[in-house]
Amino acid sequence: MKKGIITIAAIVVVIAIFLFIAFFGIQIGSFEVLPIDKGISLGLDLVGGSEITYEAVIPEGMDDSAIADGMETAKTMLRQRLNTLGYTEANVYLYGNNRIVLEIPNISDPEEAVQLLGTPALAQFLDCDGNVILEGTEIDSASAAYGPTDDTGVYKYYVQLNLNSVGTEKFKEGTKQAASRANESDRYVSIVMDGDVISSPSVGAEYASTGINTSTPIITLGSDSNGEYAKYLASIISAGALPFELQETKLQAVGASLGERSLETAILAGIIGILLVMLYMIVVYKLPGVIADIALVLYIAMFLVIMTALNLNLTLPGIAGIILTIGMAVDANVVIYERLREELRAGKTVRSSIDLGFKRAFSAIVDSNITTIIAAAVLLWQGTGTILGFAKTLFIGVVLSMICMLIVPRLLLKSFAGMHITRIGAYGAKLPTEEEKNREPKRLAVVNAFKITRWISVALCITGLVSLILLPFGKSFLNLDLDFVGGVSMEYDIGATVTREITDNVAEIVEEVTGVKPSSVTKSGNGGTVVTIKMTEIDTTLRDAAFEAVKEAYGADKVSLVSSDYVSASVGKDISRAAFIASILAAVLILVYITIRFEFRSGIAAIICLIHDLLVMMSVYAIFGISMNMNFIAAALTIIGYSINATIVIFDRIRENYKKVGGGSSGFDRIVDLSVTQTMRRSVGTTITTLMPVLLLLFLGVSSIRNFTLPIMVGLISGGYSSVCIAGPLWCKMKGKNVKVRG
């Protein structure tokens, strides 16, 4: 008993420590974790702001290494420019081999940001009086290095310049004058970028008569400098003369009010959803439910600490990933506790039931989580922007859930059992009656019902399938957004209910100003006061002119920008290609894993179920006319993660029951029916717990959140349905007489 109390106390202390770090932060030496309100950066879809994608115009014949160096230089230049302008919270990252993405919070007009960022970078070397010694255009390149820089042989970080002939001469004269200064404190050269002093290396007095006369001078850094700073300084110096032009290919703006409402809704829905899940676990599983909630609190606390430590960028898709991982974390406990109940009902002691419950649930939990990790890894490789946020939260969440939900509940259950809490009612179970013992186990006839359920599935998938088939021909029911097809989308809140007359009038205004007829002008937004205009690509001047014309027509004090998106056709094609590659690769890797763990036909059945669930979700997009953008990929991967998780649990039970009867193909349909029946409580319970926060996001959310969560909600229901009614029966139908199920 004493050992159990110590274990419980230790876990409570660990939870308290992680919660303290999450909300107040911690610093140990140079290691620091900020509190969640400072350590987690919020994506544009939560706080509002602008996203700009620049594409490099690569000169013909430029090699890959030069392109890579140039892109790093351009990234550093833009990062420095944003810092200079005061946008220190902006996110800058490379996408592909020739694009740079800027995410700038709290700036509502990306056109304005482009104007601010669009002027050429100016790198200069100045003396102490501010006289220009060297221009960035006179520097061919700058590179960071580590090695001896003088006769002492001491290794230091340094930056080596490569100057052209004009630069070499000017640098020699400038350093000669700097070294000749009477005051030692004036013997330096400042490296300035856009008016900001980046570094001020000193010039030795020994150069007073000759200057630094070489085309490859070096800037030696102090002993406290590191390689990262050396690379940064080299990039800043090189940025004065980029080897290529940068053109904006995507501009996107999210109004601050929309972002704030999204964040408030997501937080509220998340809190209420988690509380409902915790209540459900207590009601259904009693003491194990309380233990599951304790483990869930630890999971959430650890998740928050890791997010702040890694300074993750949290987006709406990222929140979807968190919701999914919470569902999967609870699912692990549901699988374990259902096994625990079975052992208790079979007459086992509490201690042995705990051991057997965890042992028999382990393979199902590991297999289902690994398949989800595969999907997350594919997204980490292929994703960008908000999708990367989803992939990171999903990956971290799955790994954490296996740690928290496999270790903590086991320790706590054993501790309570050691404290002589052995009444099985406390563990949500009751002994069967004599009648129940003698009764043949119930079996849902899912294999026989497959004659009907397969046609139900066809009916559910038909719209999505037809839309997919028509897509290459440009005739589809899907409402493809700019992310996939390119173009311009502008949303204005006109401060009044949008009618058909208003949409027609706005269309006329925009066409008159731009000379381009909008492809659609529709009513949107929660209050119905937002008008959405979609059209082919137009330049910045025309987009600004269209906005000003609408403001003039409906009142400058009433009309406000909600969002403004511009995506070039080339970016749209790249996104489509990346989405296709991600989907195919994830499916293939999952198929390989399931084949290894079970058998090939089970893998095919699982992939067919995934395709089924994705087609059902696409049918929802088509029927409701939901805009299909980058968030679709996050929604699709959410469904893949959930569906494969549910299917694996059933397959694991089929494998176990198959081994119990000694193998063979006879009676496999009965094994499938029995296995689905035995896991039904788990299937229903997991669907309920995962749907709770999603339903709250659906009903409480702003329109953008609802458009994201409705397909996920339908996909979750479809995933539960396909796992129960399609996966096992399909495996049964495809299973040949000579095929064995791996143990």
Image (tube, rainbow, N blue to C red):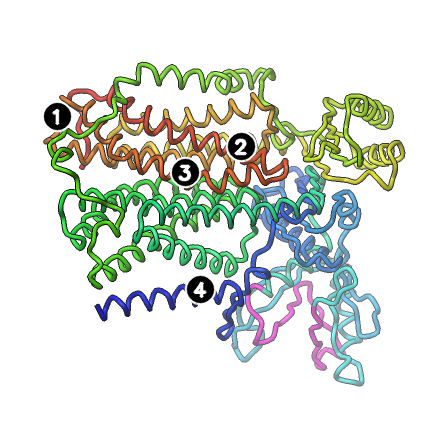
The residues tagged by marks 1 and 3 sit, at their Cα atoms, a distance apart of 36 Å
Q: Residue at x 63, y 42 (%)?
A: 99
Q: Earlier in the sequence, mark 2 or mark 1?
A: 1
Disc on the earlier residue, 4 or 2: 4
Do we see residue 79 in this rendering?
yes
* Amino acid tagged 4: Phe
Residue 207 at what x, y percent from top left? 72, 78
- In this rendering, the answer to whether 78 lies above or below 672 is below
Nearest-to-viewer mark from 3 and 4 = 3
- Label drawn at residue 688: 3
Marks 1, 3: nearer the viewer: 3
Quadrant of residue 35 within the rendered picture? bottom right
Which segment is the magenta one?
Answer: 199-228
Horizontally, is 164 left or right of 661 in the view?
A: right
Are there few (<14), some (14-19), or many (20+) residues within 10 Å of tag 4? many
Q: How many marks?
A: 4
| Magenta stretch prevailing secondary structure | loop
Look at mark 2 in the image and give the residue it sits on. Answer: 710
Residue position marked by numbered label 4 in the rendering: 18
According to the picture, the residue beneath numbered tag 1 turns out to be 664
Query: How would you rate the neighbour count of disc 2 (Cα within 10 Å): few for under 14, some for 14-19, many for 20 or more?
Result: many
Could you say which quadrant of the image residue 454 lies in?
Answer: top left
Q: CA distance from mark 2 to mark 3?
A: 15 Å
Residue at image coords 28%, 66%: 7
